[in-house]
Image (cartoon, rainbow, N blue to C red):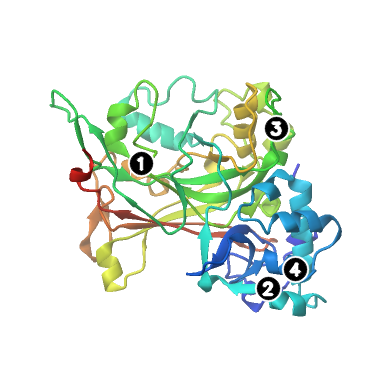
Amino acid sequence: MPITNETHDPKLRSWVESANGGSTDFPIQNLPFAVFRRQGSNQAWRGGVAIGAHIVDMAAAVAAGVFEGAALAPAHAATESTLNHLMRLGQPASAALRLALSRVLRTGAAQQAALQACLVPQAEAEYAVPAHIGDYTDFYTSIHHATNIGKQFRPDSPLLPNYQWVPIGYHGRSSSIGVSGQAFHRPHGQVMAPSAAAPTLQPCARLDIELEMGVFIGAPNALGEPVGMTQAPDHIFGLVLFNDWSARDIQGWEYQPLGPFLSKNFASTISPWIVTWEALAPFRTAFAHPAGDPQPLPYLNHPDNAAEGALNIELQALIQTPAMRQAGTAPARLCQTNYRHAYWTAAQMVAHHTVGGCNLQAGDLLGTGTLSGPTLDSACALIELTEGGKRPVQLPGGEQRTWLQDGDTVVLRGWCEKAGAARIGFGECVGTVLPAKSALHID
């Protein structure tokens, strides 16, 4: 069961002034991890920790000798070019490092002078995918999203019979997962027009977003050893924002009988900063299926999950079109939702994924699926917001969108706030659509 400790104290202040004041995503109560280097340099990629507008260069901090005791081994692991080693060490190790970082970054810390030289402005950094993602599984945890999509195809029975019993998921493609700032070409695929006799290969015309969260696995489990609900949170390293772009016209033709393929494997984008499971402890909240719904089977049920299984994370998707960018117009909001609306929790995803004996590994990524809420303005994909393309979204300057157009940039944001806790955030997850490759290159 998650507990708060001295690192969550809302009264804590840092000697890094940009971390104070309540407006940053990265106060001293957060301390998320990423992999970075100085922009445009040939420096080696290495781990970093966000504090205000800066990054603690973990390689430099270790060299400066600011860590000792239980924090030393995870600090060394955080200097590597991926965070897999740090993740593999498990939550006790990452918690020890987080505590040490909290103490050396607090106002009055004796290590301030040594650590000051280890700070890199975030404005001068570029980021890599923070872990080698060996496997990626996408779940379908929003009953509101499942219902909205189901209504478009099965108006009388939108939910399939298994949805309220089992966390639905599929295995996706990890190699095309990129970090915020990713720009990708509109994909090609087979599309079957309603009145056509045969499908055609063409660029996607119904390109969509999916506002999700990504759950990074920390400590692995052995093959054949299921992870129960009491242990499941101990196998989670942290969470990121996740845009799992979708080609809806390609998906509609290919998804039966096995599910998404080319419609999902061309690109997915994550935010660079992993907010640790421990940092999220103050924002855990009660979880329950509605009283009239089937209740989770015993292996997916536990009093801790009912008491604190959900996460109160506010989520937002915004769009900036080429015309908006040229006019200097800020991105416009498409939707806003909250992760607490999910029908299955992160712990339930881990427990179900492993109940058959699957061995999760450090750095594996679990997508939550599109996190739509109960109202139309909290629907987190254009296919829902436009009711399958029937009702375009109105944007500033008179523009509208039914589906994404070339040059569109989508921005995801996420943050946690409540009375008695310091506000923390996830930064941004940004991706841009490029024109499709010429068909001349597909011979």
Residue 186 to residue 152: above or below: below
Residue at position x 36%, y 29% in the image: 150
Q: Is residue 64 left or right of residue 261?
A: right
Query: Separation of disc 4 and disc 1 at Cα?
Result: 44 Å
Residue at position x 74%, y 52% in the image: 94
Instruction: Identify which amino acid the numbered label 2 is placed on.
Output: Cys
Res. 64 in view: yes
Instruction: Identify which amino acid the numbered label 4 is placed on.
Output: Ala
- If you read the primary sequence from the N terminus, does the residue marked by circle 1 or circle 3 appear first? 3
Q: Nearer the viewer, residue 440 or 380?
A: 440
Instruction: Identify the residue position indicated by label 4 in the image.
Output: 63
Instruction: Identify the residue position indicated by label 3 in the image.
Output: 221
- If you read the primary sequence from the N terminus, does the residue marked by circle 4 or circle 3 appear first? 4
Q: Is residue 208 left or right of residue 360?
A: left
Q: Is residue 145 left or right of residue 235?
A: left
Instruction: Identify the residue position indicated by label 2 in the image.
Output: 118
Residue at position x 39%, y 27% in the image: 259
Q: Nearer the viewer, residue 277 or 46?
A: 46
Report helix, strand or loop for mark 1.
strand
Report helix, strand or loop for mark 3.
loop
- If you read the primary sequence from the N terminus, does the residue marked by circle 4 or circle 1 appear first? 4
Q: Nearer the viewer, mark 4 or mark 1?
A: 4
Q: Nearer the viewer, mark 1 or mark 3?
A: 3
